[in-house]
Image: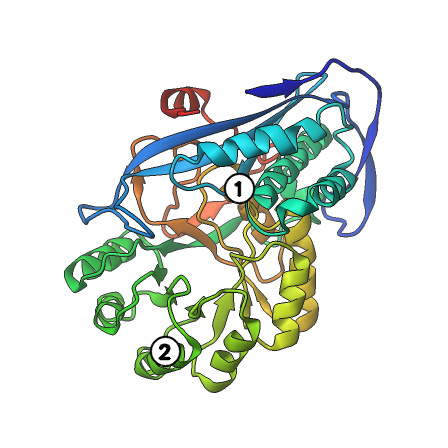
């Protein structure tokens, strides 16, 4: 299903000029109005190096979703965005198609901030965190893709210019639940050139096995996906302390218990990372005010798109909090995060889920080599999705 309208009119867009952070530049936007908006859901089979597929919150899966938002202007220019999705989420696709996309067709594509504000305000009764924000995030990414294409610049140049032309990538392992498999996956990641490996295990023997498998070749982080109470988290914190983990991510339930997270941070021995379940800048203000985090992890496909992540990055810089976006994404959200990271002085690591797909949306362009990915230099996101892959694996 797509939403469309016929309209024409001239326009300009203000953008940051390459190499001039904060400077504004007026760029002609010939495809000035959005005339078509579409949500596309694909599901691509994956394999995880000969170990059992990831099981998280349900039956083991062997496929991974990407939910695209495609915007087209009256000049035929196309922008791509991505909404966070899991499990062939046709319901999420329908929600975006019926509630979000009709509100942007006919709008001027240059009005990135205003469109985002209007969507959030008009749809506030659906909640400030969750599916509606995923859709708004996707629209924002697609609008920035259009803006950068119109400027003839890579997205990173509109964000102030790159601090690096390549970004370090960390392997974000699946949850395996046994020592042999987590050891095998860790060594495979190291052998492929990754120097940072993130685990999703929740028991000490498996975590210790991975750290030992990494040895001095890689630094290990741990994401537990919110399983523990504050008391349990502090017990695990003590047991894990000798393993010298780089950070402990989302150790407590519920993730919005910032006071509880602050207790773990203040009492425990690890740097605390969190934020993938946040919906906006204001959630990160609350986390920081509570003293809950050392590392902020907004997700471009969940937390308001490029616009919101740049605000959160500025907040983190002012507050002395490390900015390392969450990125369990393989479509436009992954590429947008690459540009956002490149625009930061600290050039944060980019997350890449450690699995091998039957087909890649961008071919080999988003496959790390030696633990790094180059920042695209073509206009817009700098990479275009393979339409044959989209059609082959489209489920809705």
Q: Which label belongs to residue 38?
A: none
Secondary structure, mark 1, is: helix
Q: Where on the picture, by quarter, is residue 15?
A: top right
Q: Residue 98: where, in percent of width, then height?
A: 60, 29
Say if residue 379 shows up in the picture: no
Mark 1 or 2, which is nearer the eye?
2
Question: Is 368 in front, or is 53?
Answer: 53
Question: Is 206 in front, or is 24?
Answer: 206
Q: Residue 209: where, in percent of width, then height?
A: 21, 69
Is the C-beta separation of discs 1 and 2 under 8 Å? no
Say if residue 211 shows up in the picture: yes
Tell me which residue sits at (48%, 50%) in the image.
Answer: 327
Q: Looking at this rendering, what residue extends furthest in the left direction? A: 180
Query: Callout 2: 10 Å neighbours few (<14), some, many (20+)?
Result: few
Quadrant location of the C terminus? top left
Q: Which residue is the site of mark 1?
A: 333
Q: Which residue is the site of mark 2?
A: 232
Question: Upstream in the sequence, badge 1 or badge 2?
Answer: 2
Q: Looking at this rendering, what residue extends furthest in the bottom direction? A: 267
Query: Callout 1: 10 Å neighbours few (<14), some, many (20+)?
Result: many
Tell me which residue sits at (79%, 52%) in the image.
Answer: 22
Q: Looking at this rendering, what residue extends furthest in the top direction? A: 6
Q: Where on the picture, by quarter, is residue 186?
A: bottom left
Q: Residue 308: where, in percent of width, then height?
A: 67, 51
Question: Is 151 in front, or is 258?
Answer: 258
Q: Residue 363: where, in percent of width, then height?
A: 40, 31
In this view, 190 is above or below 102: below
> Left or right of 202: which side holds 289?
right
Tell me which residue sits at (51%, 32%) in the image.
Answer: 93
């Amino acid at each position: 299903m797509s939403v469309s309208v016929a309209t024409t009119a001239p326009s300009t867009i203000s953008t940051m000029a390459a190499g001039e952070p904060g400077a504004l530049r007026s760029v002609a936007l010939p495809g000035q109005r959005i005339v078509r908006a579409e949500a596309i859901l694909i599901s691509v089979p994956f394999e995880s190096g000969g170990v059992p597929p990831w099981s998280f919150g349900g039956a083991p899966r062997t496929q991974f979703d990407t939910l695209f938002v495609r915007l087209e202007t009256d000049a035929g220019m196309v922008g791509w965005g991505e909404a966070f999705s899991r499990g062939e989420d046709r319901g999420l696709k329908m929600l975006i198609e019926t509630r979000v996309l009709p509100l942007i067709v006919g709008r001027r594509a240059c009005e990135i901030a205003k469109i985002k504000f209007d969507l959030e305000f008009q749809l506030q009764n659906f909640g400030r965190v969750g599916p509606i924000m995923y859709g708004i995030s996707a629209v924002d990414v697609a609008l920035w893709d259009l803006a950068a294409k119109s400027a003839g610049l890579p997205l990173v140049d509109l964000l102030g210019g790159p601090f690096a032309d390549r970004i370090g990538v960390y392997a974000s392992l699946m949850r395996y639940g046994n020592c042999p498999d987590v050891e095998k996956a860790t060594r495979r990641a190291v052998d492929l050139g990754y120097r940072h490996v993130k685990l999703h295990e929740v028991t000490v023997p498996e975590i210790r096995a991975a750290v030992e498998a990494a040895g001095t070749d890689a630094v290990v982080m741990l994401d537990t996906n919110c399983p523990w109470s504050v008391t349990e988290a502090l017990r695990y914190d003590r047991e894990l302390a000798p393993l010298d983990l780089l950070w402990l991510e989302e150790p407590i339930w519920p993730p919005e218990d910032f006071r509880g997270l602050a207790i773990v941070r203040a009492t425990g021995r690890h740097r605390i990372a969190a934020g993938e379940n946040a919906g906006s800048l204001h959630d990160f203000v609350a986390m920081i005010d509570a003293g809950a985090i050392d590392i902020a992890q907004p997700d471009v496909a969940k937390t308001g798109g490029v616009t919101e992540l740049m605000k959160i990055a500025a907040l983190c810089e002012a507050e002395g909090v490390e900015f390392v976006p969450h990125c369990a994404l393989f479509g436009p959200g992954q590429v947008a995060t690459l540009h956002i990271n490149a625009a930061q002085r600290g050039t944060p690591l980019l997350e890449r889920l450690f699995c091998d797909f039957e087909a890649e949306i961008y071919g080999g362009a988003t496959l790390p080599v030696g633990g790094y990915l180059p920042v695209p230099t073509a206009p817009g996101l700098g990479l275009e999705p393979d339409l044959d892959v989209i059609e082959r694996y489209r489920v809705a």
